[in-house]
Image: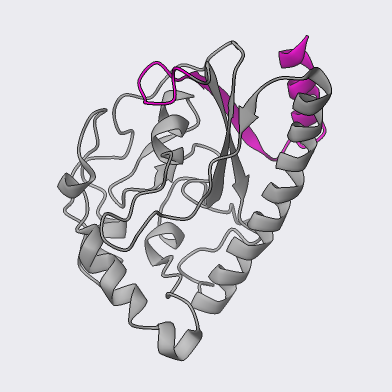
Amino acid sequence: MLEKEIREVYARHPEILYGFTDLSYCEYADEYASALIMAVPYGEQLTAEDYTEERFEQGIQTARGNLEALVEEIEAVLRQRGVKYWVPPVAQQNETELKALFSFKTAAARAGIGWFGKNDVIITEKYGPRVRLSAILIDAPFEYGQAFTESRCPADCTRCVDICPCKVLKNRLWKAGMDREEIIDYRKCNKMRSAFIPKLGRKNACGKCLAVCPFGQKKTD
């Protein structure tokens, strides 16, 4: 059974969060029945006390490598089974709309992995927002997760809003169907992060809003 084989892969990687959602809500429903969503924790689960942009960027790269290896494992199973699938690219289509071909975050909420925080990032119970997402669209049915339809962030928590250096977060609690413009001024965020390209050779990783999130905080003795 395909689902059993995929779950066996994840059983070998218990640190990774994953789930399935149907695709009836999106434009890919005619080609694929389901999406497999996975959330890999960053290499370092940084907090406000130990955060630096460089360490955060390195954590992202570590998670990226782990994700690529995991996706390859799943692809091998799908190829062996002869199942049609597609791995959507992470990259955004352009610098205007700043949207990817497939929203990992929307699928993650529908699969029950997490909800959208006040920083417009998926928040998980185990790691908070300190995860990197990926997805595989698969033309097969699975047992789907229980979708998140609203935020579980405390209404009075403003840690991410307060620390944002760009002041782009609007202190709004997410509900399913909400436009991202209601949560974040994403164009301003992108513009300010892009200003670092001449210096860093890339956009500023800017993960301060992730570091201060109380969900998934490292426990101290």
Q: Which residues are magenta?
A: 1-30
x then y, percent, for residue 173: 22, 39
Q: Is residue 10 above or below residue 207?
A: above
Residue lying at 24% horizontally and 71% vertically, measured from the top left: 166
Instruction: Say if residue 218 shows up in the picture.
Output: yes
Q: Nearer the viewer, residue 64 or 100?
A: 100
Scheme of colours in the image: one colour
Q: Is residue 180 left or right of residue 89?
A: left
x then y, percent, for residue 217: 52, 52
Q: Nearer the viewer, residue 203 or 42?
A: 203
Q: How many marks?
A: 0
The quarter of the image holding the C terminus is bottom right
x then y, percent, for residue 211: 45, 61
Q: Is residue 32 above or below residue 88?
A: above
Q: Is residue 128 above or below residue 95?
A: above
Residue lying at 56% horizontally and 22% vertically, measured from the top left: 20
